[in-house]
C-alpha cells in the first residue's frame, strides 16, 4: 500500500480539538501512506478549524464540515460516502478521543487480505478495556449480546467503531437506507455489510479511556440503540 490515495482514515468529531491535535500526527506516524479525513459537526471548540489548519501544513489531512446535522452514525456515513466517491480502496474509522490507539492500525492492515471488514476487537482473546466503570462494561456487553441475537452477527465486538472496511464492498450498501444516526450505527453497518456478502475477522485491541473531554455515550443512546436494532430484526 505505497500509494497514499488508497487508504483513508476517518475521524468523526464534535468538540475534540485537544485530542486531534495529538491524535492525527500519531495516526500518520503509524500509517504514513494514508490520508486522514476529519468529519466535524460544527464543533464550538474549533475542532474543524484546527483540522483545516493542520491540513494546510500536511496535504494528507482533509476536513469535511457539517452544519445543521449531528450524530456519530450520519457523520460516519458522510465519511464512507467520501471514501466511495474518492475511490479509496480501504477506509479505517476510529474514535477521535484516543480510545482507539493508532498503534493498532498496522495490525488491522496486516489482515486486510483475509476479510472485507477487519474489526479491532475488545472481546476476543488478547483484547481488553482500560479505565471503564462496571456500568460501562455491563452496557457494552449487553448491547453486543443483543446485537448478535437480533441481527445474526457472529462477531464478538459489534459496538466498537475501530474497523477497516473494503471500500468496494461499502459501495454496495444503500446508505440512504441506514436508520441509525447515533451509536446504534456501529451494529447496523455490520448488519448492512453482512447483507451485501462481506466477510469479517477480528483482531485484538486494548480500548483506552479518552484523554480529553467527556464521553457522549449515555443511557438514552443505549435505549435508542436497543430500539433501532430491534426494528432491523423485523423490518430490515
Image (cartoon, rainbow, N blue to C red):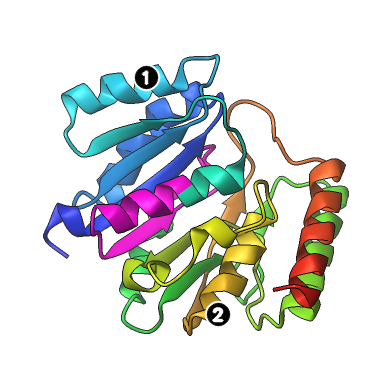
The answer, for residue 77, to whether it is visible in the render is: yes
Q: Secondary structure at mark 2?
A: helix
| Residue for point 63% across, 75% down | 124
The answer, for residue 94, to whether it is visible in the render is: no
| Residue for point 59% across, 27% down | 212
Q: Is residue 228 magenta?
A: no
**In this figure, which residue is indicated by the disc labeled 2?**
194
**In this figure, which residue is indicated by the disc labeled 1?**
50
Q: Secondary structure at mark 1?
A: helix
* Residue 155 place in picture, x, y as percent: 63, 78
* Residue 179 place in picture, x, y as percent: 66, 56
Which residues lie in the magenta part?
78-102
Q: How many numbered markers are drawn? A: 2
Between residue 156 and residue 14, name the one nearer to us.
Answer: 14
* Residue 177 place in picture, x, y as percent: 58, 61
Quarter residue 84 falls in: bottom left
Quarter residue 158 falls in: bottom right
- Quadrant showing the N terminus: bottom left
Q: Is residue 96 magenta?
A: yes
Compared with 89, 216 (above or below) is: above
N-term-proximal mark, 1 vs 2: 1
Q: Residues within 10 Å of mark 1 (few under 14, many from 20)?
A: some
Amino acid at each position: 500500500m505505497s500509494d497514499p490515495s488508497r487508504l483513508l482514515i476517518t475521524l468523526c468529531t464534535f468538540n475534540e480539538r485537544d485530542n486531534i491535535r495529538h491524535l492525527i500526527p500519531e495516526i500518520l506516524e503509524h500509517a504514513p501512506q494514508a490520508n486522514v479525513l476529519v468529519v466535524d459537526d460544527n464543533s464550538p471548540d474549533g475542532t474543524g478549524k484546527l483540522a483545516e489548519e493542520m491540513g494546510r501544513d500536511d496535504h494528507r489531512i482533509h476536513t469535511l464540515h457539517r452544519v445543521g446535522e449531528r450524530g456519530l452514525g450520519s457523520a460516519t456515513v458522510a465519511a464512507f460516502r467520501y471514501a466511495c466517491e474518492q475511490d479509496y480502496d480501504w477506509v479505517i474509522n476510529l474514535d477521535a478521543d484516543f480510545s482507539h490507539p493508532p498503534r493498532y492500525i498496522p495490525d488491522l492492515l496486516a489482515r486486510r487480505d483475509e476479510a472485507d471488514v477487519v474489526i479491532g476487537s475488545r472481546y476476543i482473546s488478547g483484547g481488553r478495556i482500560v479505565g471503564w466503570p462496571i456500568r460501562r462494561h455491563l452496557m457494552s456487553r449487553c448491547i453486543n449480546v443483543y446485537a448478535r441475537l437480533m441481527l445474526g452477527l457472529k462477531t464478538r465486538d459489534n459496538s466498537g467503531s475501530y474497523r477497516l472496511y473494503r471500500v468496494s464492498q461499502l459501495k454496495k450498501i444503500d446508505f440512504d437506507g441506514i436508520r441509525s444516526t447515533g451509536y446504534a450505527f456501529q451494529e447496523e453497518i455490520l448488519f448492512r455489510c453482512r447483507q451485501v456478502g462481506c466477510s469479517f475477522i477480528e483482531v485484538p485491541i486494548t480500548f483506552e479511556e479518552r484523554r480529553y473531554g467527556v464521553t457522549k455515550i449515555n443511557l438514552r443512546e443505549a435505549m435508542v440503540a436497543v430500539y433501532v436494532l430491534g426494528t432491523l430484526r423485523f423490518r430490515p
